[in-house]
Image (cartoon, rainbow, N blue to C red):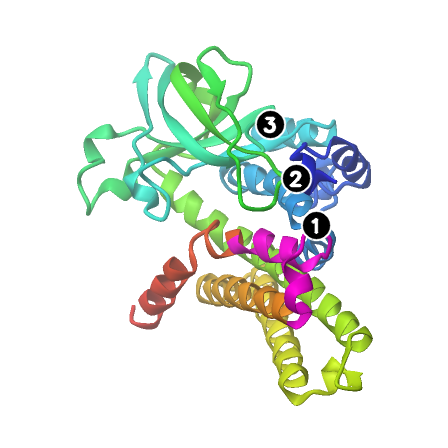
Amino acid sequence: HYDKTHEYPWPLIKKAQELGLTTQNIPEKYGGLGLSLLDECIVGEQLAWGCSGVSTALGANGLGMLPILIAGNEDQKQEYSQRMVDGQLCAYCVTEPEAGSDVAGLKTVAVRDGDSFILRGSKTFITNATNADFYTVLAYTSPSLQDDRRERYRGMSFFVVHRDWEGVSVGKPFAKMGQHASDTAPVSFDDVRVPAEYMLGEEGTGFLTAMKVFDKSRPPTAAGAVGVAQRALDEAVKYAKERTTMGKPIWQHQAIGHMIADMAMQVEAARMLVWKAAWEVDAGVRNTTTSAFAKAYAADIAMKVTTDAVQVFGGYGYMSEYPVEKLMRDVKIYQIYEGTSQIQRNIVVRELFR
């Protein structure tokens, strides 16, 4: 339904909130579910199996809360956790028109003015933008460092910014290839006055916080890719049992059978990488490399598995009345958001040779 109407799935979101699915990573002492990251990945895979657009709409809340949970003080953690428990939504505002993979290339600035900061800039491709009640926003608080490639990483800070503050505006949602159940739109900050107490962590630590966010957010994102790939595999197996050619089910033709076997192996291997990356976080082990492994591999095999599922269906796979074409459209974004597959490989190389 939502794939065709492009509507935000409010009935599903409300039900998910009742179940605590928008507060999975919020500790129990703040009213959340307090799930381990591995648990989050298992839940996220199942949600994406059903619809990755809905899964992304839900997961964006956990992503938006991460800077607060990582860098916020106790009062901030309590206040915004309670807002989420009470049914509010949030969004993570980092990506900009000219700064996606290159986080340090962002142009948004927050200039000190007495006991406040004046926030100016634009963010783009923001999931939950049109429905969020508050945003976690990364900006340069030391604009003089923006062009210093060696020192610019020390010039950024995170802030919590409320949707209803003067100067905050949300643009028209983008028309996308897939994941139509999640809204994606630009957000602009036009001289927004942000009181200093809404800064998360110490001034200048925003880039470090963003990197910590990625280590925790990439395993659940990769789990979503695994969920879509598993759904494509399940649909391919079901169809290959029912569809007959030349007197036998098509899975008995070696070309098709081997294709599906490869799909199954790739899905399981990706799942194990995701689980390892999540387990490392839960065990307190630095997971930057494994997280990049999981994100790149899961996204890439999900694209391949969904494409192969369409192939198994043949001409029917290209038709919208069958489920696999939606899976193929939906899954492409996993190779792009939360760091492209190419950026993940850059991270792996950097970690191997550090």
- Examine the image and state in which quarter residue 137 appears: top left
- N-terminal label among 1 and 3: 1
In this rendering, position of residue 93 left or right of residue 327: left
Residue 181: image tag: 2
Local secondary structure at mark 1: loop
Amino acid type of the residue that numbered disc 1 sits on in the rendered structure: Cys
- Cβ atoms at labels 3 and 2 below 8 Å apart: no
Residue 20 belongs to the span the image colors magenta: no
In this rendering, position of residue 181 left or right of residue 286: right
* Residue at 79% across, 71% down: 238
Residue depth check, mark 1 versus mark 3: number of the one nearer the observer: 1
Q: Give the magenta-colored segment's residue range.
A: 312-332
Residue indicated by mark 1: 51
Q: Position of residue 310 (x, y in %)?
A: 63, 65
Q: Position of residue 175 (x, y in %)?
A: 53, 36
Residue depth check, mark 3 versus mark 2: number of the one nearer the observer: 2
